Image: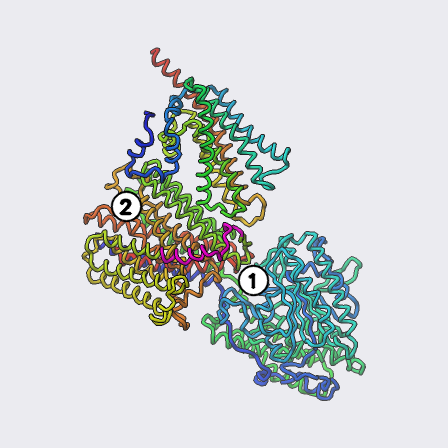
Amino acid sequence: MEESNISSSTSSSIVPIPKTRERKAMKEAKKKKKPESSTGVSSDVPISSLGAAFVHLITGLSLAVGFWVARNKLSVDLVSDPSLTLFLLWSIEFPAVGLKMLAFLVLLSALLIYESYFRALGRSILGLISGAFMNTLGAVALGAPIGMQYLPKTIHWSFLMSVFTFVPATAVFGASWTDWHRVFASMKTSGNTEYMILVPAYGAIIGGWFGAWPMPLDWERPWQEWPICVCYGAIGGYVVGLINEFHFVLTFDLIARLREDNRAEFLLA
Amino acid sequence: METYLKRKKWVAIGFLLIHSVAILIFTRGFLLTRTELPFHSTCSDVSRSPCLASSLPNHDSNSVHGSKQNQPKCWTKPVVDRVVIIVLDALRIDFVAPSAFFPEAKPWMDKLTILQMLAFANESSAKIFKAFADPPTTSLQRLKGLTTGGLPTFIDVGNSFGAPVIVEDNFINQLVLNGKRLVMMGDDTWTQLFPNQFQKSYPFPSFNVKDLDTVDNGCIEHLFPTLYEDDWDVLIAHFLGVDHAGHIYGVDSVPMIKKLEQYNSVLEKVIDILESQARPGGLHESTMLIVMGDHGQTLNGDHGGGTAEEVETAMFAMSTKKHTTPVPPEFDTASCRQNSDGKQICISSIEQLDFAATLSALLGISYPFGSIGHVNPELYALGSNKWNLDDFELGNFGAKSAVKEWMENYVNVLCVNAWQVKRYIDVYSNSSVVGFSSDDMSRISDLYSAAEQSWSKSVKHILMDSNGDENSTKISALKDQIAAYLSFFSSVVELARSKWTEFNLNLMITGFAILVISLILQSLAIFHGDKTYAVDSWLSTGAAFTLFIVLIRASSFLSNSYILEEGKVANFLLATTGLIRLRYSVMRKTMRKEGVIFLAMVSVLRVSIDIGLTKQAATSQFMSSSPSWMLGITPDHPALTYATELAPILSVFILICVLYLAVARTPNEGLWKYVTVGSMISYFLIALLWASESDIFGLDGLLDVTGGRNRIPQTVYVIALVQLFVLASARMFCAGNDKNWAIRTVALVSACSSPVILLSGKQGSMLALAYLLAGYCIMRLEGVERRSKSDGQKNFSKLNPLSVVQWTLLSICMFFASGHWCAFDGLRYGAAFVGFDEFVLIRQAILLTIETFGFSIILSVFGLPLLIPIRSQTPQAHGEKRHLLFQMYMLYGVISATTVAATILCVTIHRRHLMVWGLFAPKFVFDVVGLILTDLLICLASAYYL
């Protein structure tokens, strides 16, 4: 089921769309040469809750580390210097997320060869940049300020959002348009890895959306500036997503185990 | 089916009527109106009053100071020569009154010690008053109230609509008429209100709230030298520091206390100067100093509403003469406390309404025509010791005589005053559209005639009587007369307040309730005859999302900040729906291009909204502007100039091509086609007009050929009118062959669009293009959520609420993107004169309405049928489509009415809010006008389409 590539996906749509029009398709087209790299994932093996807890600790902790470094080492925070803080956050969070996904890949499948690590790394970096681009466009459509003085903040914010949303997916799916399509558009996850990608990403987006609400209010607080409260919202949504996902992974694990038990009983009977 | 749909046309008219009634009732309770009268008082008027033409002829004729008068008398005899008015903006009563009057001493109290010291000294000729302001307690309205002696409302219907200049008769105007010389320094609001009246003025900008010192320092710099000059009679100095400190830091703050201490030292110095010149023959022999606030403020520094903190302000009055007349205890309003030393200290009270009349009486000029205040006895007494200064030495009269003399004087002043107020009330009631009720008028007339009869019968003779003997019956007759006048005044003021300053909450709630009921009825009308609607599970989630968006937008109106940035909020929600649609289109693997184009158009509109917001911030008092968002291209770069000249004309030609394609692709439908061709001609004419106006095409001679720059716009209007006439008559006389919706809609929308584009100026064509593209995307994306799920053919006639919401949000964005905002200074008056040079009210008002609501309501309502996807042409499908269109119009109406209901709820809640007159009321007016227009157009559209 995974052999479909870009041509099959577009031809299956009702109205044919030129590839250049669609940014996701563009990104996909760049990586067309290695569509096989994503295949192993969806054949899902339930991972142990210990492993899940470990990788969650990585991403959660790295956010905290980012804030700690910003506050204690450089004595800045989101309010006083949003650009620098955001840069710190995403540059610390990016390896963490990459590491988490790699850990999953390792935990999940033995299909990965050494070469794939580098590929996954390259994919993540490409995903980071293209994701940042997409996030910038989305933010501008929703009304983010477009002045020159906001440009660095917007860029760093988009990188952080990209780390939350695009990087995990690109690390795992690569250019497989069908996987992207299935997970993000149709929200049909097959197994907890994809759930782990989907839920925090949507959490970050929805959190950021709600985080924009206080911006027009006339409280004249410094955190109402773009992109500070949106960042808080996105980070909050991401963390909620992580917790929810962690919870889900545990129960999913449990359900899977129960189901296996049932099947065993059924087979026994 | 036919009769069923015929009935539906009446439904739209029914909702128009219900909404009109609801809004009318609410408006009667909320928008208090008062008519400004153009009349002015003159000195000679007083001969028509029953009062004595000059005060106290019997006493004055043989006394020495009658000849001391060097100015001609007007209505009453002047008692002071010069007045120094120092206005301290937002002066709370507890800044001035001693802390003993308040339950608890706070750090900001007892800072203006010099005023307290003077007021409570023995034998003092100074007094502290608690002054009551009338809401709205904003500086501009208050200054207007203080000088006219009236009660300004939000809508003072008069000639000065839009400009703040006071055209009503007022104290300042009377001063000028009577040859007094005025000097003003400080807040530049005064020079906006009175552009020509001041002989000398030193205005300083008042809008920068963060600047605590510029205005004050400017005032101080000019105040002290001016006090030594003799070329003025009335000096006004308006300090803003306390108001600004309150807005920024609040009352309980260090800057506020510093400001108060600074004022104390300034006032000390002013009083020193005045007293040093107060000797007989000196500059300030007979000068009155008044230190007053225009309104109070809350502890947060807000003002504008009607809470006690905001309306209670202070007034300090001091005469440079000694030995002021004591006021008889009947008319004394003083309330007294023991201070910490055990000394009795008293402060009196005064209405700001009475300020204009009292000052006019003190200076001996005619009272402003529209003043409804009365001469305050205590303030008047402070100045009125001029004549008894000599009598004091005579000994045989003594204090009692002084009181009697003061009363004789005062009763005559009140007589003139009562006559003037009665005259105003009569004239107002006759000339105003919404005058007073006859019950109220007769009650007031009774009071007045009773007072006047007793005046003519007895009191006048007492005053005329020159024998001067002291008997208590005369004194009590005078007191009764004064009391009669005062009760007349108080009933007039009570009536005026109830008419001009008090909201009628019952009417407001009734109006709101009717609107909510109509909202429920209209929602039911959507679902009427559509039983399967609720069953469709996806549509329910779609409806829930729609409801969510509409409710977010509606509840955003509860905060002033969201109203200020309403365009951004609408854009945010529109982009959100666009993203949701894009997600669905990606999910269904169809229409992705349209989804992306839609978001791109939303981004274009948001840039346009941002530009509009910077324009709004430049004039709004509530917004801070952030101008530096531009991308670093200087505005006069040649490439940019060419682009701005070329792009509109290019977009017009694209629009012509689009229309041509629309016409060419439809099968032969003669009439509609010719109408559309008419629009193409209009578009071409618009392009021609713009090309000839800009200087890069070398078409300057064209205007001369075509006969002036008004010819082309007039032609466009005529073409549009002819088109509309043809469409209406075609609809009336050949109702049979109207199966093709698209071409009919295109014909109507294009006919309306050409004047809209023309009036909107050069941005109009580009915005129309963006609107067209975004609307096309909405149409294409309509039903993207369900197409793959169920057979499109079967299901297409189901209402898709998300599309209609997107369409309304898009039109709201268009309102803001075309550079409008919900304030009267956001109206583009220039548009009313496109094609016409002279002003005709109805014609220019129609043009202004078309310009303001053209994109957001007119094109939006008429273009709604374009959202129905064109597919089936069978007669049965046609009937379904008509039903669907009816539902869409009802839904459109519900969405508009929901936002208006939210606005109405918001102004009801915030009716005493700081920004109610600056922000909420204009928003209310725009929304209400928009709703009525929407309802009206829905009626017309359903008559045309259904």
Is B670 on the left-hand or right-hand side of B267? left
**Residue B583: x %, y % from top left:** 37, 38
Counting other residues with Cα less than 10 Å from the Cα at mark 2, is it few (<14), some (14-19), or many (20 or more)?
Answer: some
Position of residue A10 relative to residue B756, above or below, is: above
**Residue B464: x %, y % from top left:** 67, 87
**Badge 2: chain ID:** B
**Badge 1: chain ID:** B
Quarter of the figure that contains the C terminus of chain B: bottom left
Residue at image location 48% in from the left, 62% down from the top = B824
Range shown magenta: B628-650
- The answer to if B646 sits in the magenta stretch is yes
Amino acid of disc 2: Asp
Pointer 1 and pointer 2: residues touching (CB < 8 Å)? no
Q: Which mark is residue B136?
A: 1
Q: Is residue B864 visible?
A: yes
- The answer to if B636 sits in the magenta stretch is yes
Indicate the secondary structure of the residue bearing disc 1: loop
Precedes in sequence: disc 1 or disc 2: 1
**Residue B96: x %, y % from top left:** 70, 61
Question: Closer to the camera, B601 or B694?
Answer: B694
Position of residue B558 relative to residue B503, above or below, is: above
Counting other residues with Cα less than 10 Å from the Cα at mark 1, is it few (<14), some (14-19), or many (20 or more)?
Answer: many
Amino acid of disc 1: Pro
Q: Is residue B98 visible?
A: no
Question: Closer to the camera, B299 or A114?
Answer: A114
**Residue B236: x %, y % from top left:** 66, 69
